[in-house]
Image: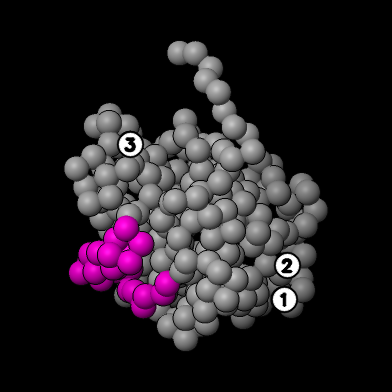
Amino acid sequence: MTNDQVDYDKIFRLDGKVALVTGGARGIGAEVCRALVAAGAKVMATDLLEERGRAMVEALKQTGAHAAFRKQDVRDEAQWEATVAATLELFGGLDILVNNAGVEDLTFLTDTKVADFQNVIAVNVTGVFLGCKHAVRVMRPGGEAGRGGSIINVSSAAGLVGFPALHGYTASKGAVRLMSKSVAVECGRLKQGVRCNSLHPGLIKTELTDVWLAKFVDLGLVESAEASRAAFVAGIPMGHGGVTSDIAAGVLYLASDAARYVTGTELIIDGGYTAT
């Protein structure tokens, strides 16, 4: 195989691409949407938070971006089918899927209710499975889009190492990591032109992270939210947490032609937390 001519000025651009981002109303998902449209993509954002999601999309459209919003429960296969169909109808294709929607339940093992554990698995694992299934169906040769594509499944540092009181979450995010590899291998072997990778954020400043850190206080593991954050930061070799744009930049890389030979791997963005 010979080295071909690469235009490094354009290799990270997504002009002409169509992306679908779940959990896009706030936090990491909203920043991913902003990054994708900035790189030239058209974006369908989905979430259960309809008011916030529509406001986020309207802000994008005010900048001239091509973006839309749909309310979606990722646990529901019929809603996946409808969302993918709406994306194809509105934007004429589907090239990028970012499975970002997720939930957590912070409870000690012996206090965890089966229904709560199962809900975390349903959103974080079944939701990702359904997204991959219906994206591949339309991205592969002969599909309604048929141009191949990139699937980015947002896992977590908690999909690589253990955390107290996060049993459903760690189980689900570990499953996302290995499911991504399975999808990548199948799509590669079947020459479907679809890449699939997992992305693993560490401690990122978001509303949900603040709530999560506060729950460690409620469980009596630390004395205050400040102590909770300090305890996590102490384990990060870089000495600080990240911000949502750090994760969005990783999504841009995996979505772009710069990562055209990258599939079945994990991109860890955690300041070195899981390297220690």
Residue 225, label in figure: 1
Tell me which amino acid carries mark 3: Gly
Front residue of this view, candidates 177 and 276: 177
Residue 5 position within the rendered picture, expressed as x and y whole percent measured from the top left: 55, 23
Residue 275 rendering spot, x and y as whole percentages: 66, 41
Mark 3 to mark 1 CA distance (whole Å) = 45 Å
Snapshot colouring: one colour
User: In percent of the image, x 52 and y 20: which residue is there?
Assistant: 4
Front residue of this view, candidates 7 and 117:
7
User: What is the magenta range?
Assistant: 68-92
Task: Describe the element under mark 1 as helix, strand or loop.
Answer: helix
Q: Earlier in the sequence, mark 3 or mark 1?
A: 3
Along the horizontal axis of the image, is 76 left or right of 245?
Answer: left
Q: Is residue 175 left or right of residue 271?
A: left
Dots 2, 1 in contact, CB < 8 A = yes
Q: Amino acid at mark 1?
A: Ala
What label sits on residue 238 in the rendered view? none
As helix, strand or loop, the secondary structure at mark 3 comes to loop
The amino acid on which the numbered mark 2 sits, given as a three-letter code, is: Arg
Name the residue carrying label 3: 193
Q: Which mark is residue 229?
A: 2
| Distance in Å between CA atoms under marks 2 and 1 | 6 Å
Give the residue at the far right of this rendering.
Answer: 239
Quadrant (top left/top right/bottom left/bottom right) for the C terminus: top right
Marks 3 and 1 close (CB-CB < 8 Å):
no
Which quadrant holds residue 117?
bottom left
Q: Main secondary structure of the magenta part?
A: helix
**Within-10-Å neighbours for mark 3: few <14, some 14–19, many 20+:** some
Residue 179 left/right relative to 174: left
